[in-house]
Image: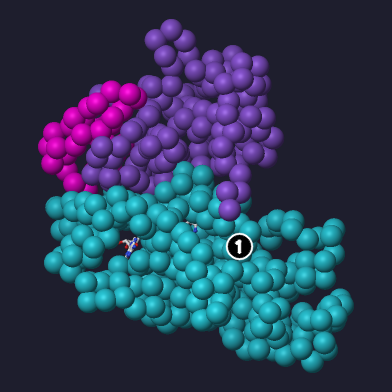
């Protein structure tokens, strides 16, 4: 086995171009488990932890939208500590990942490239219409997160490409994330749901995890809720949401799922749970939007 | 490959390291430091917790080559020549050790907490130790030990606060 240790980004891209089969290793929290159990025996490991650039984040503007560009190698613990205010949904999801040791090491780039249907980073990124910046020696391209996942553990990355960064619009309204698992720490999600309200553009974003072969948004539910809020003039004059709206939203979210039966839960349970998570997270987000101080800013766990 | 790293303040070299092995294997089998324990090799139990550049991580999930030129701190490095670290003393005083298998990893995780957070709440202690499993104690004595270590630390003014929202 070869161990490549590029010191900078251009060297890493060169290395990936010369060894398209090389397995990149960032936090190692997915890769090392596979190596330790002999599930994977790559010819070449490509260590990305020496590349400072991957561990940086910065504020940018994309098409007039204030965003954060997060280097692929920023670990969860820093997303929580440093970006909790700008990207609350992503920070909430990050808090549910593994344990402190895992969050100190695991990265968003690794979560994306692993493309597990249960990756906790994915739903909040979907709810924010994040974009993934991929790069190779051939150049750089940025694709919407919705086009990144192409199947279970499959992505749109070419063999010579690496994830450089993720671009996430700064929140303009409440965001929530909820995860179902058997305990608080160290669980792979049975299912997850993320919601983001975007009052500036009168939009709603959603993301479902562990609910289909790939993480996906509930597009119909988003359109329904955004229209319902606009029709009732709720954005400017927020009042309690009628049950009919939260119910319908939950139904449409459940409808967007295509879950399977597995060891963690049945498809029927997942569909039911998603409906509940969707209603709950919507009501938390809406309470926060209405400035109900009793509810705002409190972190919950479903 | 040859691996050079600093462990507990000493520069060390390991030869014939296989590229795919873990830092945990290097510590235990090549550097004669069996304090960090190997139980699950998948990040679930925390018994292999070490400091890597001062951050607690699972040594079983660090590729050996990733530790090149890095600083590693293991349970063997917590005490100085004279005295046990406050967390070690507190684990003994509170009876937080039974079979002891989980102890080295818990000590590193607890050491990190009490040095980072001056007066941790029970919720903060539980959260900080959420990645460390213990099959013997039922955790109550461990909680008591961490509270005691934190109090003693506060008494000596050793602890320093980092963290917080740095935006
Ligand atoms: C005990 C435990 C608990 C966990 N709990 C959770 C959880 O609750 N939620 C969750 O979502 N995940 C969880 N995971 C999985 C894992 O921690 C995450 O998926 C993490 O984000 C992976 O990041 P990493 O940097 O460690 O990836 P690595 O293991 O280093 O890499 C993962 C994959 O991504 C590739 N890769 C890494 N970086 C790049 C890059 N920049 N460009 C291209 N390819 C790249 C690697 O080649 C590999 O295929 C857990 C893992 C463990 C061991
Ligand atoms: S041996 Fe590393 S976490 Fe269990
Ligand atoms: S004392 Fe035996 S596992 Fe903790």
What residue do we see at 19% from left, 37% from top? B3
State which chain disc 1 sits on: A
The chain coloured purple is: B
Which SS class for mark 1?
loop
- For disc 1, the marked residue is A86
Note whether B155 is above or below A90 in the view shown. Answer: above
Residue A218 appears in which quarter of the rendering?
bottom right
Note whether A28 is above or below A237 in the view shown. Answer: above
Q: Is residue A240 left or right of residue A100?
A: right
Q: Is residue B6 found inside the magenta-colored segment of the image?
A: yes
Note whether A268 is above or below B133 in the view shown. Answer: below
User: Dot 1 surroundings within 10 Å: few (below 14), some, or many (20 or more)?
Assistant: many
- In the rendered image, residue A139, in percent from the top left (x then y), is placed at 26, 76
* Rendering colour mode: by chain
Which stretch appears magenta? B1-30
Q: Is residue A133 left or right of residue B85?
A: left
Residue A24 appears in which quarter of the rendering?
bottom left
Most foreground residue, B138 or A191: A191
Note whether A204 is above or below A77 in the view shown. Answer: below
What residue do we see at 79% from left, 92% from top? A231
- In the rendered image, residue B155, in percent from the top left (x then y), is placed at 65, 17
Residue B65 appears in which quarter of the rendering?
top left
Is residue A93 among what the camera can see? yes
What residue do we see at 32% from left, 44% from top? B62
The chain coloured cyan is: A
**Quadrant of the frame with the C terminus of chain A:** bottom right
Most foreground residue, A260 or A75: A75
Q: Is residue B28 found inside the magenta-colored segment of the image?
A: yes
What residue do we see at 46% from left, 59% from top? A57
- In the rendered image, residue A279, in percent from the top left (x then y), is placed at 73, 74
Is residue B148 among what the camera can see? no
């Amino acid at each position: 086995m070869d161990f490549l240790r590029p010191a900078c980004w251009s060297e890493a891209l060169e290395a990936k171009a010369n060894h398209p089969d090389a397995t990149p290793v960032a936090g190692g929290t997915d890769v090392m488990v596979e190596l330790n159990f002999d599930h994977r025996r790559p010819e070449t490991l490509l260590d990305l932890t020496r590349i400072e650039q991957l561990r940086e984040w910065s504020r940018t503007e994309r098409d007039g939208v204030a965003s954060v560009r997060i280097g692929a190698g920023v670990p969860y613990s820093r997303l929580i500590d440093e970006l909790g205010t700008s990207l609350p949904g992503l920070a909430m999801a990050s808090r549910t990942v593994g344990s402190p040791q895992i969050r100190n090491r695991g990265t968003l780039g690794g979560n994306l490239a692993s493309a597990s249907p249960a990756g906790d980073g994915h739903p909040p990124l979907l709810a924010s219409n994040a974009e993934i910046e991929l790069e190779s020696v051939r150049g750089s391209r940025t694709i919407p997160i919705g086009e990144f996942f192409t199947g279970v553990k499959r992505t749109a990355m070419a063999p010579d490409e690496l994830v450089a960064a993720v671009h996430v619009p700064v929140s303009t309204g409440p965001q929530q994330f909820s995860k179902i698992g058997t305990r608080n720490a160290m669980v792979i999600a049975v299912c997850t749901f993320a919601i983001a309200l975007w009052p500036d553009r009168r939009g709603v974003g959603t993301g479902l995890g562990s609910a289909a072969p790939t993480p996906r948004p509930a597009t119909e539910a988003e359109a329904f809720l955004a229209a319902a809020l606009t029709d009732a003039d709720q954005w400017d004059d927020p009042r309690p949401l009628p049950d009919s709206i939260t119910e319908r939203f939950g139904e449409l979210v459940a409808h967007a799922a295509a879950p399977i039966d597995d060891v963690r839960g049945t498809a029927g349970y997942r569909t039911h749970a998603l409906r509940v998570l969707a209603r709950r997270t919507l009501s938390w987000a809406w309470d926060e939007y209405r400035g109900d101080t009793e509810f705002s800013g409190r972190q919950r766990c479903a | 490959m040859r691996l050079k790293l600093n462990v507990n303040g000493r520069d060390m070299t390991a030869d014939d390291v296989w590229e795919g092995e873990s830092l945990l294997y290097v510590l235990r089998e090549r550097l004669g430091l069996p304090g960090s324990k190997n139980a699950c090799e998948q990040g679930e139990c925390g018994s292999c917790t070490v400091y890597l550049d001062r951050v607690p991580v699972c040594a079983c999930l660090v590729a050996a080559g990733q530790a090149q030129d890095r600083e590693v701190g293991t349970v063997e490095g917590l005490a100085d020549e004279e005295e046990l670290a406050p967390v070690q003393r507190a684990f003994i005083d509170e009876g937080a050790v039974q079979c002891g298998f989980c102890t080295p990893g818990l000590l590193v995780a607890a050491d990190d907490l009490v040095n980072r957070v001056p007066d941790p709440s029970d919720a903060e202690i539980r959260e900080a130790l959420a990645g460390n499993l213990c099959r013997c104690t039922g955790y109550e004595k461990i909680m008591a030990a961490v509270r005691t270590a934190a109090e003693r630390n506060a008494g000596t003014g050793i602890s320093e606060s980092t963290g917080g929202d740095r935006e």
